Image (cartoon, grey):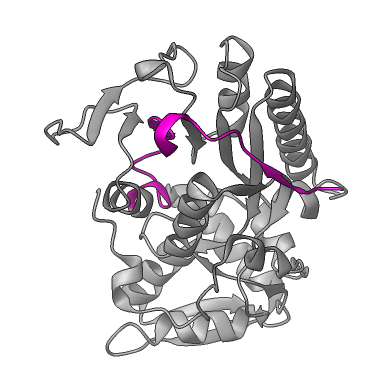
Amino acid sequence: MDQCRQQDAPPDGVRGVAQVWGATGAVGRFLLPLLRSSGTRVVAYSRQPQDATATDDLIWRQADLQSVDLTWPHALPGSLICAGPLDHFADLLERTAIPCGTRVVCLSSLSAQWKWASANAVDAALAGRLQAAEQRVLARAEASRAECCILRCGLIYGAGSDRTLTPMRRLAGRWHVLPWPARAKGLRQPVHAADLAQVILNAVRSECLPTGIRRLPGPEVLDWIEIWQRVLATLHPSPRVLRIPDPALKGLLMWLVRRGEPWASKLSMLQRVYEDQIADSGDWHSFGVTPRRFQPTSQDFVDDVG
């Protein structure tokens, strides 16, 4: 059973440096300001060069998870935070000597739970890779006497870089209508990236880390129609949801694929929108965070990073 583990306090209460992967992603861009405002020094990694100038509390490094080697500033354990690809992070941990007492906090996906028994081979394979990566991270942390918490989440929004709500909102803005299969009312729990960032901050700074795999879906259970109505309400004038016969929508998606719309090629999503993907949200209280209800604004769909 997962439990709260008391860490060995570093000298003078200092936890060392937080090293962050996925720093320019949806959660990472909310996390960096939180870490810095809390007094935590940060080394942020990005595959692309960043224009930001290094400061006393933030250093940017251009690196890829598959090739970077870790260093340990001031010989303190510090924190390793992954908001990027978990399988590559597992590779990194397995080739790295991790100091005892290091705190490891990673984002994963509830797809590991939802898709493992999917009839769709692509979805099932994804779930298998996620579960394998989670177990590799946990095993490496245990072998190194490091504390580890893996946060499973799903349908993240709030940074304009998601691959579901933002692209569909953009499409609806162009067409002034959002085509949607009439019977597709699968349940979802949207979660704001800023709330996940707050969880990570609390996990890094807490005296007692809730270890193991934790589930962090959004607090509201909504069907797709309600989700789209709230998303489209952030556009002016607001497009409407156009419910069309399910076979007709599949034909429309195939036409979009032939036109070269890259997001439309994910036809497996058409199957998933009929299915409920929900999880218990009780783990939020372990981190002292109350997630916000799904009341999006136009700012939640703006990608400031580009």
| Residue range of the region highlighted in magenta in the rendering | 1-29
State the residue in front, 91 or 3.
3
**Count of numbered marks:** 0
Percent from the top left, x then y, of residue 260? 42, 47
Q: Is residue 22 left or right of residue 216?
A: left
State the residue in front, 64 or 225.
64
Percent from the top left, x then y, of residue 170? 36, 68
242 up-or-down from 210: above or below: below
Q: Is residue 166 left or right of residue 258?
A: left
55 up-or-down from 1: above or below: above
Percent from the top left, x then y, of residue 55? 15, 34
Q: Is residue 235 magenta?
A: no
Residue appearing at x 45%, y 51% in the figure: 201
248 up-or-down from 139: above or below: below
229 up-or-down from 215: above or below: below
State the residue in front, 192 or 273.
192
Asked whether residue 163 is in view, the answer is no
Q: Locate residue 114: give its quadrant.
A: bottom right
Residue appearing at x 49%, y 41% in the figure: 83
Name the outermost residue toward the front.
12
Q: Is residue 13 magenta?
A: yes
Q: Is residue 2 left or right of residue 221?
A: right
Asked whether residue 65 is in view, the answer is yes
Residue appearing at x 41%, y 82% in the figure: 232
Percent from the top left, x then y, of residue 240? 45, 89
State the residue in front, 291 or 237.
291
